[in-house]
Image (cartoon, grey):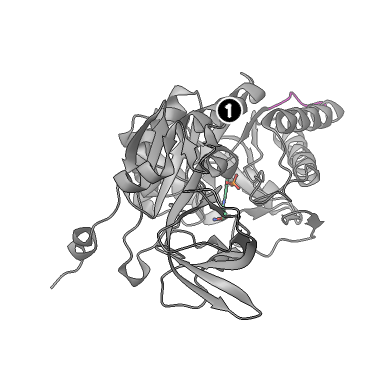
Amino acid sequence: SHTVSRGDDGVVRVGGIDVKQLAEEFGTPGYFLDEADFRERARAWRTAFGHDADVFYAGKAFLSRAVVRWLHEEGLNLDVCSGGELATALSAGMPADRIAFHGNNKSEEEIRTAVEAGVGRIVLDSFQEIVRVAHIAQSLGKRQRAQIRVTVGVEAHTHEFIATAHEDQKFGIGLADGQAAEAVRRALALDGLELVGIHSHIGSQIFDMAGFEVAARRVVKLLAEVRDEHGVELPEIDLGGGLGIAYTSEDDPREPHEIAKALSEIVTRECEAAKLRTPRISVEPGRAIVGPTAFTLYEVGTIKPLDGLRTYVSVDGGMSDNIRTALYDAEYSVALVSRASDAEPMLVRVVGKHCESGDIVVKDAFLPADLAPGDLIAVPATGAYCRSMASNYNHALRPPVVAVHDGEARVIVRRETEEDILRLDVG
Ligand code: LLP
């Protein structure tokens, strides 16, 4: 249930609190996150996948201690990909055995910390790392549960997927030329590792289940090869994250229950055909859980109409709080949220305040022609990969994340101050 609504006065309210009040109390720019929506989405994934499967929230999308606690309470696990994310997870009380540790270049120190903490799995990303993790675990007198990340030769794009013979990218170990089977062979031979499964992540912002089907089929085929060669049936497969959300009205996302049903059907069918026990499935949605739950609130500053082109609307943030438009040509929508307007729509480009012409938040949008400095505008669906990829470019102060719940708003990540910036400056 979305708790965002627009009143007769044109003012948008989230969880009963109006955005003008939020702006006054917490300032702009700010990310405002609907906690009930987050919990509902997390629960929908959990429920859809049931007790025979696990849902690992991908912390890279957005992580804070409050988020870790919500996930813990809702029965989700957590995927981390750095020492920093691991520290956040542990400090907020996520049980280590519910944490998966990812990354293509984990440091020895990160690996040691993860093994000592007792993380539930480390996802091995290279031949070197197989040996590295095994040695570290062994030196600590442990046997580390691990999965091997494979690249299945499916390249997922936004709306389509292209099967490639060989994936030219830094993650995982290739299936095609027998590399993944060799990796399994080596991992099984090492005392420091308990190899429990195979991992595949095909990409992000995907709407079509076909890529996941191909991935699942190829991973099950590898499991069958492993069984034939070693007599071992690996008990887990992880199919990664990547489920798309609606950034604009053109996007039509799948629901968690559709995804769960499709994945479990494919895996079950393929395993039956290969006479394998069906492994425990896990997934790692990040964006699909947190993305839709937050919006960024900006105050309109300078408005510059360019005759015959468009109107440039500058806001008090920009590429430092949302790099996705500049980086991926990502599409967002925008709305005037602090009042009603009957004015004609005008074509705008919402830009930030940074010293960079590519500092665009929303490339093409319409806002009422009577837009004025001081108006509040909101960009929806900024819960994922906005705060987590925020920067201090131009010594911008990264905005707060404010959770709204039951008519109350509370800061879960505070706004940076100039002292925060200066604190790191030595000399
Ligand atoms: N699992 C693994 C191993 C991943 O690498 C990722 C994302 C996920 C899960 C979560 O994917 P999601 O469900 O959130 O799409 N910064 C980019 C996306 C890069 C994601 C990298 N890995 C963005 O802003 O769109």
Q: Quadrant of the C terminus?
A: bottom left
State the SS at label 1. loop
Residue occupying image coordinates x 66% and y 46%: 246
Residue sitting nearer the eye, 52 or 208: 208
Q: Quadrant of the N terminus?
A: top right
Q: What is the x, y in percent for residue 233? A: 69, 29
Where, by quadrant of the figure, is residue 275 drawn?
top right
Q: What is the x, y in percent for residue 406? A: 42, 25
- Residue 277 forms part of the magenta stretch: yes
Find disc 1 in the rendering and name its residue: 1
Majority secondary structure of magenta residues: loop
Residue sitting nearer the eye, 415 or 170: 415
Where, by quadrant of the figure, is residue 95 drawn?
top left
Range drawn in magenta: 275-279
Say left or right for 379 vs 405.
right
Residue sitting nearer the eye, 31 or 324: 31
Residue 86 visible to an observer of this rendering? no
Say left or right for 425 vs 348.
left
Total numbered labels placed on residues in the image: 1
Residue furthest bottom as drawn: 307
Q: What is the x, y in percent for residue 94? A: 39, 30
Residue occupying image coordinates x 49% and y 23%: 74
Amino acid type, callout 1: Ser
Residue furthest left as drawn: 427
Say left or right for 62 vs 365.
left
Q: What is the x, y in percent for residue 122? A: 49, 41
Residue furthest front as drawn: 342
Residue occupying image coordinates x 68% and y 50%: 202
- Residue 104 forms part of the magenta stretch: no
Residue sitting nearer the eye, 332 or 334: 334
Q: Residues within 10 Å of mark 1 (few under 14, many from 20)?
A: few
